[in-house]
Image (cartoon, helix red, strand yellow):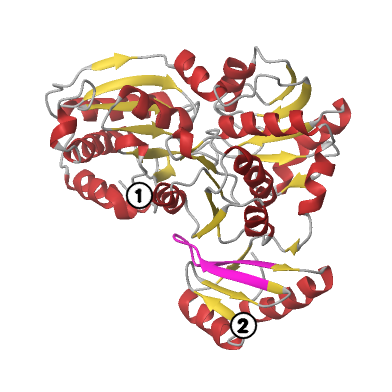
Amino acid sequence: MDPAIFKAYDIRGVYPDQFNDEDAWKIGYASAQFLRSMLHGYERGQANSQAVCVGRDMRKHSKAVTDALIEGMKACGANVIDIGMIDTPQMYFAVNHLGTCGGVQVTASHNPAKYNGFKVSGLQARPVGVNTGLKDIEHIAMALIHTKGKATGKVEERDLTGEYKGHVLRFLHPNLGHLKIAIDASNGMAGKMVPAIFGDLPIEIIKLNFEHTGEFKHEPNPLIEENLAEVKEAVKKNKCDFGICFDGDADRLMMVDQIGKNISCDLLTALMASYFLKSNPNSAIVYDLRSSLVVPEEILKNGGTPRRERVGHAFMKKALRDSHAVFGGELSGHFYYRDNYYADSGLITLVHILNIVSAAKMPVSELIRPLRRYYSSGEINFKVEDKQAKMDELAKRYSDGQIDNLDGVTIQYKNWWFNCRPSNTEPLLRLIVEAKTKEVLEEKLSRIESQLGRPV
């Protein structure tokens, strides 16, 4: 087992080169031991509290990896509820719906087909990351010498599609109008779940890449521009109201308007902020610090409390819980909901988008137009070995600005700002610059690039 597969938020690597079925057994044993150890006394007596939920995506090797994972859990003495081939957000639902001590989803999300991995959730589907248990799981798994042991745990197979559909659609407004939308499932889990959940609604869906072959026609990462080409073409060709592209495990999405223009996820956060604050006045809304200034402006304009947070689902989910926020949005396409166990969901995000567009009675481009009031570079990567030293240089060069260090270094001026933060796993700095005019953006970006080097 390659220790490099243990990341900040999940376990992920090339199968079977970096981890194999024997390693999956050990991770199953370790994750079950850790999750059960986190139970408190009052929770131990509940019906499914000693059980662990397990699900998987549609990759060719996911079934074999899942079988090995389950055998390891059983050898640890844990009972397992196998909920089959699902989107990752269904795992968050299952852990809460069934009352288990946690769950493990076998998926490599947006990575290419040769990858696989594990997303671990604890009680109430709280994320298990490097600071909340993933290090413990790594230590236990790496210390196991063999994969032998009597399997004392039992396995129960459950299909939660009906219950999950009810949960997702409870957020749908009853007076939904007819809409035509293009959806690119990226040959991932949206290809199964979109028809199962949205098939009965008065909407026409142009389906792209809904087939499951274990391979991807294009990389299942909607943040990469070239991966949006098919959905943009389908929107224009079929005169759709808008288009959606999901990632591999359907916990993230990107949206394009009726003319095929990208709607960045911070603008979508701003749009959804005003929507949520109408029915949840004075609520807090969480956004990641890469987001446009339009996000806190819209939150304040609509009577909400902006909560700025560092990047990453573990930080976003904790911030939502701590502030009892109704909603949160991340530039990466993760959207989080108080009424979804403070967890993210691509499908629930689609429900809210349907509600907003149906009620607007105007083209999506017109709905978004008032929010396009700043110019952004988008996130740009630079290869830097000594990341902290380079960030210190930036802070010194721009010391006359308003500086904070919530996640990397953020420096703000009257008519522009930037954030430069380190990658958790690579020798990269990630930069985003925003300005009130295109000219200021180009000037400031050029100056910062001269200090950081050529983008990669």
Badge number at residue 401:
2
Which is nearer the eye, 308 or 155?
308
What type is the residue that disc 2 sits on?
Gly
Q: Is residue 50 magenta?
A: no
Left or right: 321 in relation to 436: left
In percent of the image, x 63 and y 46: which residue is there?
273
Magenta-colored segment: predominant secondary structure: strand
Note whether residue 186 is visible: no
**Badge 2 element:** loop
Looking at the picture, how far across and down is residue 396, in whole percent? 55, 87
Q: Which quarter of the image is occupied by the C terminus?
A: bottom right
Quadrant for residue 122, please give it. top left
Q: Is residue 51 above or below residue 125?
A: above
Residue 156 location (% of width, % of height):
28, 14
Relative to 379, residue 269 above or below: above
User: Bounds of the magenta span?
Assistant: 417-433
